[in-house]
Amino acid sequence: MFRSIRTSVALSCALLALLLGVQPAAAAVIINETGRVGSYQLNDFQVGQRGANCTYESNSFDLDNISVRAPFVHGDYQQMTWVGWEFRIQRDAPPFDGAFGTIFKSAIEKSRANDEFIADFSRRKWIAPENPTGQYRVLIKIYWYEPGSKTAAEGRTLARYEWYKAKHDADTYVNMDLCLPHY
């Protein structure tokens, strides 16, 4: 009897530790989901893979570009169907009141996927204007298309990346919520 209780307690503790151990410090914030969506993963963690990289110019220390990590997206069916993703750059202008507005919307990158195989998407980049001002953040929008269609979306997810890696030459640091205009 004691052996079964000890075994149950040990297994329960191990399961709890496993569940707590795999939780990220924070991840992308899901803003909205509509329609029929498949499985997806947004790699956006404080430690390891950040959702976006903010790269700064060597001489001026100004923001040069934001490189956006692509999502891992499955189709929602056994057969291959089209899925897509785009990213948006939002800017909060001085006096930094949290009123972010979209200043760039990428084209939708599309690929085929199913419930077993993910779409083959690539990292994408936005080039900042000269002498940038404001604070910048990234939104990701994922699309799932009806079987046999490359244009009729049946599901959508909109998310915001929370973790950004700031890079200036060999120096880096992690920033939460946004990219600053200067390193």
Image (spheres, rainbow, N blue to C red):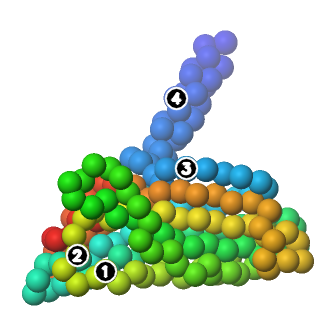
Tag 4 residue = 13
Mark 1: amino acid? Ala
> Which residue lies at the image location 79% right of the left edge and 79% below the top edge?
150
Task: From the viewer's perspective, tell me whether residue 128 is left or right of residue 45.
Answer: left
Which dot marks residue 128? 1
Mark 3 or mark 2, which is nearer to you? 2
Whole-percent x and y of residue 5? 62, 17
Q: Nearer the viewer, residue 82 or 47?
A: 82
Assess disc 1: are there few (<14), some (14-19) or many (≥20) residues with their C-alpha within 10 Å of its C-alpha.
some
Label pair 2/1, CB-CB below 8 angstroms: yes
Tag 2 residue = 132
Mark 4: amino acid? Cys
Labels in figure, total:
4
Mark 4 or mark 3, which is nearer to you? 3
Q: Nearer the viewer, residue 62 or 75?
A: 62
Mark 2: amino acid? Pro
Specify which label sits upstream in the sequence, 3 or 2: 3
Q: Residue furthest top?
A: 1
Q: CA–CA distance between discs 3 and 2?
A: 27 Å
**Residue 100 occupies quadrant:** bottom left
Whole-percent x and y of residue 112? 75, 79
Assess disc 4: are there few (<14), some (14-19) or many (≥20) residues with their C-alpha within 10 Å of its C-alpha.
few
Task: From the viewer's perspective, tell me whether residue 58 is left or right of residue 148.
Answer: left
> Which residue lies at the image location 42% right of the left edge and 82% below the top edge?
125
Element on which disc 4 rests = helix
Whole-percent x and y of residue 122? 54, 82
Q: CA–CA distance between discs 1 and 3?
A: 25 Å
Tag 3 residue = 31
Q: CA–CA distance between discs 2 and 4?
A: 51 Å
